[in-house]
Image (tube, rainbow, N blue to C red):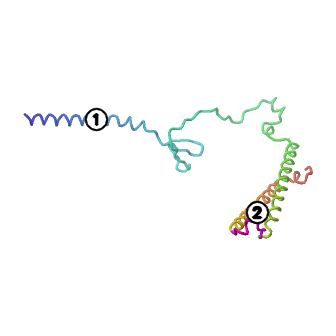
């Protein structure tokens, strides 16, 4: 009789384990689908199917919420009465030549002022640089390392200001000829 009881308890355990296994297997697909999918950013687009050539990067964190906006509409047909008044839809986006000339002159004035300030600063730095031998200050006589640090800082400042002056001159040379000479075309 004890062997029969042991056999029954063994059967009960096997059935219980089988039932537990069945429940786990039945619940597994539901658990697998509730796991969030990996989301990738490909430029300005978000997807769960990345394009290998699209330089896609996986996003860390939770889900992405996309809010639909208004669609960008292509070129629309403009009525003939509006076309007659404004010339053309492409011409409406253009700036009047007198306005553009005024803007160019303003840009030239701003660049010239910046160039003058940069050249003044460059002259001050060159005076202080003294051909690579800046004058020692009182505390630098006792601390030569402090003097060397100041020389390195001056050299860097001179390189930066030289690059600034060159950049401003480059920008001035890019302006239209009429703006840089002050004459009308």
Spot occupied by residue 129 in the image (x, y as percentages of width and height) = 78, 66
* Quadrant, the N terminus: top left
Q: Quadrant of residue 156?
A: bottom right
Do the CB atoms of the residues marked 1 and 2 lie less than 8 Å apart?
A: no
Answer with left or right where residue 35 lies relative to residue 68. left
Q: Nearer the viewer, mark 1 or mark 2?
A: 2
Q: What's the residue at 62%, 33% (across, down)? A: 69
Q: Which residues are magenta?
A: 133-144
Q: What's the residue at 87%, 48% (across, down)? A: 105
Confirm whether the magenta stretch covers residue 183: no
Q: Secondary structure at mark 1?
A: helix
Q: Secondary structure at mark 2?
A: helix
Spot occupied by residue 184 in the image (x, y as percentages of width and height) = 92, 49
Give the label on residue 158, or none: 2
Spot occupied by residue 76 in the image (x, y as percentages of width and height) = 72, 33
Q: Which residue is mark 1?
A: 22
Spot occupied by residue 18 in the image (x, y as percentages of width and height) = 24, 36
Q: Is residue 163 above or below residue 35?
A: below
Cα–Cα gap, marks 1 and 2: 78 Å
């Amino acid at each position: 009789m004890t062997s029969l009881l042991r056999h029954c308890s063994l059967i009960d355990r096997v059935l219980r384990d089988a039932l537990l296994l069945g429940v786990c297997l039945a619940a597994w697909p539901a658990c697998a689908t509730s796991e969030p999918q990996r989301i990738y950013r490909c430029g300005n687009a978000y997807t769960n199917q990345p394009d290998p050539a699209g330089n896609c990067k996986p996003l860390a964190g939770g889900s992405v919420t996309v809010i639909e906006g208004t669609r960008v509409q292509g070129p629309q047909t403009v009525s003939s009465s509006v076309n007659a008044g404004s010339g053309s839809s492409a011409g409406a986006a253009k700036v009047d030549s007198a306005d553009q000339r005024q803007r160019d002159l303003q840009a030239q004035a701003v660049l010239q002022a910046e160039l003058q300030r940069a050249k003044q600063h460059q002259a001050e730095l060159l005076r202080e640089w003294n051909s690579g031998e800046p004058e020692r200050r009182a505390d630098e006589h006792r601390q030569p390392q402090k003097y060397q640090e100041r020389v390195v800082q001056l050299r860097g400042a001179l390189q930066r200001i030289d690059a600034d002056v060159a950049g401003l001159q480059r920008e001035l040379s890019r302006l239209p000829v009429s703006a840089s000479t002050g004459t009308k075309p």
